[in-house]
Image (cartoon, rainbow, N blue to C red):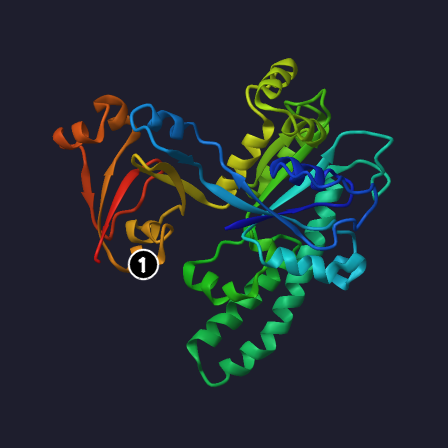
């Protein structure tokens, strides 16, 4: 699972990406299209439950869950018609599972805004319009083929035509597809199209270092907009976080204390992105390693086991599961087992966030 960082040029997108991935790459120049190919990075997802587990199970290694981020070059008005290498940039968005849109919520005369003034809602509308237009084009191209297949009475093709028409009507009302309710069969019928407005989105408000809590009216406008479609919002001062990311641990803690942050805002961004992707974590714990594994909400035990290795899903027998609360109460897995708290779960079990697991598989 991966998220693509998008935004208009000069909103702090690449600065945020560099900070998130602790990149040492040289900062890009202050002009549009400085990032031509998407940069990719792996980001750890902070989770204090890992530390709590290791108080009772001491491993050689601690491995947090991770997610992949893609820094996609700035989009401008007209991207759907190819402006600013738009087609190339839009193709990168089609390949990710969720979108992080960075919106500028700070004033700085030294950083030029591509539209001439700072207006995060106008920025959001610009990008959303381009994605809506691109999705309409994709569906229009797909409709003819689906209609030809439907003439034979093929049920799948008939459903596909119906869903395409339903989606197009929604897009024509200038609404993104993430606000359209489709049943599983309908979603599956168009899943291969990579429709961008159907992807979940997280708005990242890039704020001034004097507004780390995001109380500026510009941020409130972003929150109000996001609430209409159930999107998340996270605040970050990308410039400050880039400076913090370059410090060693001791200096980092001191700087965080100086600015009144309990943790880097990047930690919040990573967790919110994880949530936006629809992911939760289960844990495996032993002397070799204590590790967090990502799984899609609603996954069965075999599907979650398959995250470790695809063979684990096909050869799954059962899962032995206990909770962190059990570990903190009984202090060891041996005592959890002795107390009858170690649960045996089969193939139909729906994994829960925070489960600590052993998977038993066929050889």
Q: Position of residue 83 (x, y in %)?
A: 80, 59
197 to the left or right of 299: right
Where residue 19 sits, quadrant-wise, is top right
- Report the residue at 51% width, 35% height from top: 271
Q: Mark 1, residues whose alpha carbon is within 10 Å: few (<14), some, or many (≥20)?
A: some
* Residue 214 vs residue 22, the one in the foreground: 22
Q: Secondary structure at mark 1?
A: helix
Q: Position of residue 258 (x, y in %)?
A: 65, 13
Instruction: Classify the position of the C terminus by image quarter.
Output: bottom left
- Residue that badge 1 annotates: 311
* Residue 135 vs residue 291, the one in the foreground: 291
* Residue 29 vs residue 111, the one in the foreground: 29
Where residue 117 sits, quadrant-wise, is top right
Can the viewer see residue 172 in this picture?
no
- Report the residue at 65% width, 40% height from top: 17
57 to the left or right of 33: left
Q: Position of residue 294 (x, y in %)?
A: 42, 44
* Residue 283 vs residue 61, the one in the foreground: 61
């Amino acid at each position: 699972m991966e998220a693509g960082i998008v935004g208009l040029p000069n909103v702090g997108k690449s600065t945020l990406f560099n900070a998130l991935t602790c990149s040492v790459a040289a900062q890009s120049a202050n002009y549009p299209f400085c990032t031509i190919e998407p940069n990719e990075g792996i980001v750890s997802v902070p989770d204090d439950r890992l530390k709590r587990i290791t108080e009772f199970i001491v491993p050689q290694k601690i491995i947090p869950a991770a997610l992949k981020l893609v820094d996609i070059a700035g989009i401008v008005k007209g991207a759907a018609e190819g402006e600013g290498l738009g087609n190339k940039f839009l193709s990168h968005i089609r390949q990710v599972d969720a979108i992080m849109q960075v919106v500028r919520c700070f004033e700085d005369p030294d950083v030029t805004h591509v539209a001439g003034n700072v207006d995060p809602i106008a920025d959001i509308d610009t990008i959303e319009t381009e994605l809506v237009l691109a999705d309409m084009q994709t569906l229009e191209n797909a409709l003819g083929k689906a209609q030809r297949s439907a003439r034979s009475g093929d049920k799948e093709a008939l459903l596909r035509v119906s869903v395409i028409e339903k989606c197009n009507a929604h897009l024509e009302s200038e609404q993104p597809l993430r606000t359209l309710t489709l049943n599983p069969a309908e979603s599956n019928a168009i899943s291969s199209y990579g429709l961008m407005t159907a992807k979940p989105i997280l708005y990242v408000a890039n704020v001034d270092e004097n507004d780390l809590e995001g109380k500026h009216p510009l941020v409130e406008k972003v929150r109000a907009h996001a609430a209409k479609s159930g999107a998340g919002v996270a605040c970050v001062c990308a410039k400050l976080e880039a400076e913090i990311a370059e410090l060693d641990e001791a200096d980092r803690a001191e700087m965080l204390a100086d600015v009144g942050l309990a943790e880097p805002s990047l930690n919040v961004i990573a967790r919110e992105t994880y949530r936006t992707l629809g992911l939760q974590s289960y844990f495996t714990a032993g002397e070799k390693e204590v590790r967090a594994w990502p799984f899609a909400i609603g996954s069965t035990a075999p599907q979650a086991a398959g995250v470790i290795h695809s063979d684990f899903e096909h050869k799954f027998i059962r899962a032995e599961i206990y909770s962190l609360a059990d570990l903190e109460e009984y202090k060891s897995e041996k005592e959890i087992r002795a107390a009858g708290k170690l649960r045996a779960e089969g193939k139909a079990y729906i994994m829960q966030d925070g489960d600590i697991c052993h998977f038993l598989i066929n050889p």
